[in-house]
Structure formats: structure tokens, C-alpha cells
Image (cartoon, rainbow, N blue to C red):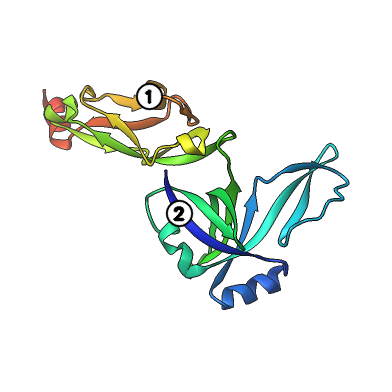
Amino acid sequence: MKTYQLSAEPRTDLGKKAAKALRAENKIPVVLNGGEIVELPYTAALKPGEKIVEIGRGRGLVTTDLAVSNEDVRKLIYTPDIYAIELDINGEKRNAVLREIQFHPVKDSILHIDLLEVNDKKPVVVEVPVQLEGHAEGVKAGGKLNLSMKKIKVKAPYTAIPERVVINIDNLGLGKTLQIGDLHFEGLELMNAKNAVVCAVQLARAARGAQAKA
């Protein structure tokens, strides 16, 4: 994946009122998940913006509340590309991937962003764009190529996740489908259902009409 540099500042004033005031400053509330798992009660000092979220069995997860500039994330959000995010939090570097974005239902502005902290050992699940290459046999025979899944979910350490997965369709015949179970990419675990259709070559309307007449 490409790397995206993003500066963030710790956020200690929480709640709806504080989030609204932050957005008025053209900033976006962010939560960085996936931090260290600790035993409770936790007595060590927390960094600015950090808090403990109880996850059960006497353990808690360290999460970090942050704020980022609206302008700084535009090229991260409004793009078909995927990125590994290098966060700069007051000079401290932390790696993350985009987990979820909450948009305003009317204005379509960004209300909130969830990030997931990553490292080169822990696998993460990311949606990766699909790129088809080649010329399907079925299209040469008069069929129409239909891409059903523009992205597929893969699981791997973030350092092993590609910018896109390339699928060769040269042997895809007329009326045939290519499913998740037909695919294999070295180092990646595919997380979609095995019978999910990625792409298919369908009979064109004219071909269906001719077939019906025959």
C-alpha cells in the first residue's frame, strides 16, 4: 500500500458538544483503535488523548481520541486508492489503516473517523480494489463483462496488502462466472464468501434474442 502522512492532535474534551465545536473549527473527531491490551485495574500513566476501554475478563484496550484537519484527510477519503496511514501525534509516529467513516446524512460532510492501529505482525482485514486484466473469451464471443465486486476483503499484515488485486480474465467464457473461491493471492487470505461472484460474462441482449429465436 501507499503511505499517507497525517498529522493529528490528542483530543481530551469529549462528548457531543465538544465534537460539534471541533467541527466548527473545520476539524474531525477521530478514534484510534487497536492499541495495547492491558490488565485491569490499569495504574500506569496514560498519554494525552488515551483512555481504557474495558473488553472483559479483567482486561482493557487502550484507545486514543484525536482530531485531524478536514483539509488534511480529503485526499485520503475521496479516492479509490487505499493507504497505510502514518500518524504524527505530537512527534510520535504510529501506523494505522482506515476503519470506518461516518458522514452527515444530508450535507455528506465527514462527522467522525475510526482508525485501526497496525503493525507488521498483526493481520488486518482491508477492502482492496479489484483490477481486471486480459480479454475474456466470452466477450470475444459476443458476451458482456460485468464486474460485480469492485473491492474484495483480504486479511494480511498491513505491509503485505497490495494497492489492488489483479485478476486475469482471459479464460472466462460466455455465461461463466469468476467467484472468490476461484482466486488465490500469495500471502493474502480472502474473507468474502467463496461463492461470491467477482465478475461474469453475460449474454448480450442481442445474443439472448437470437438464442431465444433459435
Residue 66 disc label: none
Figure quadrant of the N terminus: top left
Residue 135 in sight here: yes
Give residue 48's position: percent from left, percent from top.
72, 62
Figure quadrant of the C terminus: top left
Residue found at the far front of this picture: 91
Give residue 61's position: percent from left, percent from top.
74, 46
Instruction: State the residue in front, 14 or 35.
Output: 35
Choose top left, top right, bottom left or bottom right for residue 139.
top left
Residue, disc 1: 183
Choose top left, top right, bottom left or bottom right for residue 173.
top left
Please give the name of the residue rendered at 40% of the width and 59% of the height, measured from the top-left corner.
78
Give residue 208's position: percent from left, percent from top.
17, 30
Residue, disc 2: 4
Q: Residues within 10 Å of mark 1 (few under 14, many from 20)?
A: few
Instruction: State the residue in front, 68 or 192.
Output: 68
What kind of element bears circle 1?
loop
On the picture, is 14 further left or further right than 117? right
Please give the name of the residue rendered at 55% of the width and 52% of the height, measured from the top-left corner.
100
Please give the name of the residue rendered at 23% of the width and 35% of the height, measured from the top-left corner.
145
Looking at the image, is 90 positioned above or below residue 142?
below
Q: Label 2 is placed on what type of residue?
A: Tyr
Residue 104 in sight here: no
Q: Are marks 2 and 1 in contact (CB under 8 Å)?
A: no
Per the model, the C-alpha gap separating discs 2 and 1 is 29 Å
Q: Label 1 is placed on what type of residue?
A: Leu
On the picture, is 54 further left or further right than 1? right
